Image (tube, rainbow, N blue to C red):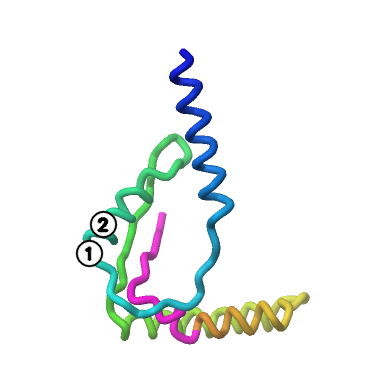
Amino acid sequence: MEEGRCRREIFRMELKEVINARHSIREFEGKPVPKEALIELINQASKAPSAKNEQPWKFYVICSKKVRDSLAKIMSEEFNKLNNTKDEKLSSEVERVALKFYKNMGNAPNLILVFR
């Protein structure tokens, strides 16, 4: 029993470190991501908790710059439509950061889209 308690404490400590160390990245180097790394990311993400443990996720990997840029254009247009129709607009800083990101999706070499 003592060993199980010790493992939980280590897990809790590692989880706390992961949570505290995380940060958002909005600009990428554009280096290709190895296919094996994308597969591993999707394998891990597919195990995320879900209602009734159904894991209803569908993952789509975008590797094409042309498709990424087309998606970025659509998202930028939709962002502008939503922001212009709301009673309360986003702060100018949030709007600036979002529009900069949507310009080319931060130059991410790959996108992983998750659908349910």
Residue found 63% across the figure and 78% down from its top: 82
> Residue lying furthest right in this view?
87
79 versus 16 height, above or below = below
Residue 67 horizontal/vertical position (percent): 33, 81
Task: Give the spatial CA distance, label 1 vs label 2.
Answer: 6 Å
Task: Inspect the magenta stretch and tell me whether residue 109 lies in it.
Answer: yes
Q: Residue furthest top?
A: 1
Using the image as rendered, state which of residue 18 and residue 102 is in the foreground.
Answer: 18
What span is in magenta? Answer: 103-116
Q: Residue 19, position in %: x, y?
A: 55, 50
**Residue visible at 42% across and 77% down?**
28
Vertical side of 5 occupied by 53: above or below: below
88 inside magenta stretch: no
Query: In the figure, residue 31 lies in which quadrant?
Result: bottom left
Q: Position of residue 103 (x, y in %)?
A: 49, 86
| Relative vertical location of residue 106 with respect to residue 17 in this rendering, above or below | below
- Using residue 92 as the reference point, say whether residue 18 is left or right of it: left
Task: Answer above or below: position of 26 versus 73.
Answer: above
Q: Secondary structure at mark 2?
A: helix
| Residue 38 or residue 83, whichever sits in front | 38
Amino acid type, callout 2: Ile
Q: Which residue is mark 1?
A: 35
| Image-based side of 54 in relation to 19, left or right | left
Residue bearing the label numbered 2? 39
Q: Around disc 1, counting alpha carbons within 10 Å, would you say few (fewer than 14), some (14 to 19), or many (20 or more)?
A: few
- What amino acid does circle 1 point to? Lys
Q: Are marks 1 and 2 in contact (CB under 8 Å)?
A: yes
Q: Image quarter for residue 99? A: bottom right
Residue 91 placement (x, y as % from top left): 73, 78
How packed mark 2 is, by other alpha carbons closer than 10 Å (few <14, some 14-19, many 20 or more), is few
Q: Quadrant of residue 59?
A: bottom left
- At horizontal 39% and vertical 85% (from top left) the residue drawn is 69
